Amino acid sequence: MLGSFRGAARVLTAAAALTSLAGCASTLPSFSGGGSAPEPGPAPMAAAPPSSIRPDEIVGRWGMAAYHRPEDRARTEAAARGQCKLPFVINRSSTGVSMLGHDSPQVQDMLLKAGPDGKTYVGPSPAAPDADDREVVSFDGRVLIMKWVDPEVAGRYGTMILVRCGAEGTTARAPRPAPAAR
């Protein structure tokens, strides 16, 4: 009888040890797979490159118009110049600029951000490009051309041309030299 008691005690002790090890199994490395190294975790996100346009460069009053067909661009730019009596206003905010988004009469804080594709975007979230963003097609200091990233929004609003309101002869933005290679 004593032998069967010792045998039962050994089985219970082994079962208790296995049960306590089972709780740790999720933190132990896997030894199946032929001794290969554990799979790497997700790569750390690199900091987004800075936008090629600073917020202060687009703050101001703008005449605005939009077009859907590229052949209408010159006519639309001329029409935008005539809209300064009812300007589209871009103000400075603590995070970038404040301006109207789409489908809302409320002014929103927007960020100027560079996307992984090297393009500049204006939008409310830090991700670029995001569905609520506008891509900066061109900017020379006097004329800012942007198109919506979301195809549905772009279909409704077209490509925006903003022409800076102000005295004639305001100088255009000088092109910036490319950043130095590191």
Image (cartoon, helix red, strand yellow):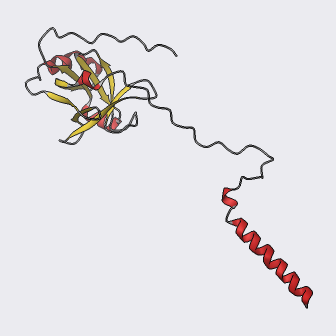
View extreme (left): residue = 85
Q: Is residue 125 above or below residue 26?
A: above
**Residue for point 38% across, 37% down:** 126
- For the N terminus, the quadrant is bottom right
User: Which quadrant of the structure image shows residue 84?
Assistant: top left
The one nearer the camera, 92 or 76, is 92
Q: Where is residue 27 in the image (x, y as percent from the top left)?
A: 66, 56
Q: In this view, does 181 lie above or below 90?
A: above
Q: How many marks?
A: 0
Q: Is residue 179 above or below residue 118?
A: above
Q: Where is residue 57 in the image (x, y as percent from the top left)?
A: 26, 21
Q: Position of residue 148 (x, y in %)?
A: 31, 32
**Residue for point 42% across, 29% down:** 115
Please indicate whether residue 41 sits to the left or right of residue 71 in the image: right
View extreme (bottom): residue = 1
**Residue for point 47% across, 13% down:** 180
Please indicate whether residue 106 sits to the left or right of residue 115 in the image: left
User: Which quadrant of the structure image shows residue 141?
Assistant: top left
**Residue for point 73% across, 53% down:** 30
The one nearer the camera, 139 or 159, is 139
The one nearer the camera, 179 or 162, is 179
Q: Where is residue 159 in the image (x, y as percent from the top left)?
A: 27, 26
